[in-house]
Image: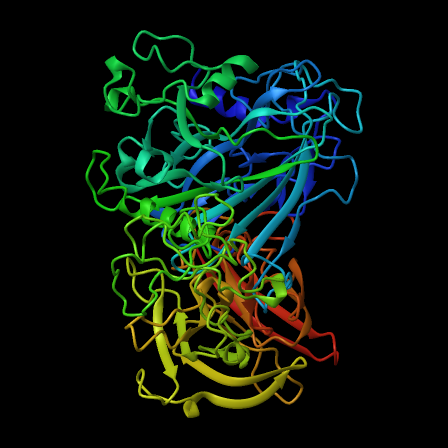
Amino acid sequence: MNGLNRYLVQGILLLLLISVCAFAQQPGYRSLRKITIDDYWHYHNVGNLGLTITNYGVIGEGYNNPDQPSCMYKLQTDNIREQIEHLSYGGLWVGGIGGPDGGVHVSTAIIDGVFEAGEEGFEFTNTALESDTIKIRSSIVTSRYYDPTAISHQDFICDFTDVNKTVPGTSFQIPNHTPLGLNIHLESYAWNYPYTEAFVILNYTITNISKYPIEDLHAGLWTDASIGNMNYTSIYEPGGGWSWYDNLNGFDIDYNMAYQFDVDGDEGFSQSYLGIRYLGTSNIKADVNVNYDQWRWLGEANTNFPDYVLPTSDQERYEVMKGRHTGKYFNSVSAGGIPTAADAADSWMLILMAGSMGDLLPGESVKVVFAVVCGMWANSDQNDTPARRTKVRLNSDWAQIAYNGEDIDGDGKLDPNEDQNNNGVLDPGEDEYRPDLDLNNNGRWDPDEPVFGDGDGNLDIKEDVYENPFRQIEADNGVIDRYILPSPPPSPVLLVVPGDGQVSLFWNTISEEYEDPITREKDFEGYRIYSAPKTAGAEDATLLAQFDKINNLGYDTGFDKIKTDTTINGQRYNYRFTNRNVRSGWPGEYWYAVTAFDEGNPKTGLPGLESSILENKTYVIPGTEAKTSESKLPVSVFPNPYRAQALWDGSGDRERMLWFINLPARAKIRIYTLAGDLVDEIHHNGETYRGGDVRLMAERIGNNETVLAGGMHAWDLISSYDQAVATGLYFFSVEDLGTGKLETGKFVIIK
């Protein structure tokens, strides 16, 4: 199957689930949906990993929509070499022995090889209720989704089930599907801290809602991964050069992480890893093994890879989940190991599984948690090595730290303070397991028991200390509280106001009132002001200025130079910073952000933590503000004369632009030829105008929310008859719709 056919197959996967499927349009997104309330347009974008989440067990959007990431890292960068996609689709698999027949069954969100209606694979469904869509909450106090009970900066929450044999709202049968009787509650978490922006955590709660026990439960995350950069080889353009067949997989056993990479890195455009890491389960008594498997897309038996064959039945899938390749996670293909030679590059599926999580009785639940992680190559080595995986390993470790929470050492239990004399040294007897003090004889220390060690050779500290009243978490509650990260103050509420040749930033003091969730102290230290990079090829941002408290911890600048007290649109702002000598009228060139950072820990030397640029990053086009009735500035055009191929222009006739400036807030612009013929008429509203009537503006701005000065309007040199205008002298009139005042002028176009 060639790359184009493979794309078409992926594009119709969800369409073919039921015979009544159709294209549907959501604002800004074009994708596939069923008659049930399938939600496939939500994607994590608070950090740098843009991952699509659905409410029917599938992750990714199949590379169907160029305006929506499937699994893109880095989502927020302006460096096109690092805007890399990593998977088309993925989904949950759950297997066990149960159901009415007591047989082996595996319920799958999606599998490879589904071509036509009537084939199995899409076995998790949501309901037909309009309210059954993904819910959002955020722990960022300035977010419109703010919820004090939120786990992360961006929580997605949904439910789906395997109990239906027909798609809800239709009579369409789900073929070859014997339900285990499961309800799945998914919560996905994403953060925007610099050390957490490269992963999304998938927290699945699996509940047995049948009347039959499920034995030997296993769960896994299957992915159709493919690493590629649409700026280098685009799947969206005919002949764009996209290939599914240039990837290799691996299993980093020390990190419980499956991974994939592009075999040659596409000349620097695809030098990134996708990782799927197992983080843990709520059943701490279970003897869980982490298993890995892979096979080629629709991979049948092959003499080159005889052990890596597509499973085609529930029995075969269950054998995969139990670890058919356990003990073969090495690089000798002849002995059944993972293919690693460059000539083995292909379209490799991968699946990471955990089990057994024990038996699940009717009404019981168990959690299983995975992380989708990305990371750029750490060096330019053309061979996959642990050193080259340094960044994806580190990012996955941060995911594990977030999951572990109070369980600092990750051993699945709460530890007491073994350092009984508080000297910071492991003294004889402090780490000794004491069966005489283990009152319930479970082999570990529990709250309310006298303190004793666990014999692991480490000096453990007390772990059950976290408090969060919003999440109803108390210290010494006897429960491992998870998803706890050191956190800086939030970024402030930011208002960006463009002017002619300058941009002013206003922000408030909300960051200064923030209490650290771990120390419960207000440890705000200062602000940093960032802009888009000033020079090509520089880092992702330029630091314009920094201001901090006078307390002998930093530069001690104080805040007097930026203090203000002003109210704009009902919001009070306490600080102002103006960036001068910027170029007016350049779309996509300027953005600004104000971050907050804390004191760190001067005693231990821990540097201050800083909020993310992404929290209030705002794009802006500097220019003239809407003129008032008292203004003496005339309406004019720039550049004038306009010469074809202006620096901001694109290559085609519809990728050109000039600006009308010094406009009133509401105006009607008319453009005429020298002979007096009307060329075009433009209606301007400075409060709502965002450049959507000019293709070049849309291309340069993209999906970024952009602030424009209210006294400017772009024109694309296309007439009302949809024709490019010719070289010549043109006249214009501008009618102020507020006062009726009329101004006129002229400009020259030279092509």
Vertical position of residue 726 compared to residue 598: above or below: above
Q: Residue at x 63, y 60 (%)?
A: 149
Query: Closest to the observer: 658 or 163?
Result: 163
Vertical position of residue 557 compared to residue 382: above or below: below
Rendered location of residue 401, percent (x, y): 41, 53
- Considering every residue shown, the one lying at the far left of the view is 381
Quadrant location of the N terminus in the rendered image:
top left
- Considering every residue shown, the one lying at the far bottom of the view is 560
Q: Residue at x 58, y 47 (%)?
A: 723
Q: How is the image coloured?
A: rainbow
Quadrant location of the C terminus in the rendered image:
bottom left
Query: Closest to the observer: 695 or 595?
Result: 595
Q: Residue at x 79, y 25 (%)?
A: 170
Residue 370 is at least partly visible in this image? no
Rendered location of residue 649, percent (x, y): 43, 55
Residue 416 is at least partly visible in this image? yes
Give the image quarter of residue 87. Answer: top left
Rendered location of residue 102, percent (x, y): 65, 15
Q: How many marks?
A: 0
Query: Closest to the observer: 448 or 211?
Result: 448
Vertical position of residue 587 compared to residue 276: above or below: below
Rendered location of residue 669, percent (x, y): 65, 67
Vertical position of residue 26 compared to residue 474: above or below: above
Q: Residue at x 26, y 60 (%)?
A: 426
Is residue 319 left or right of 553 when viewed as pictured? right
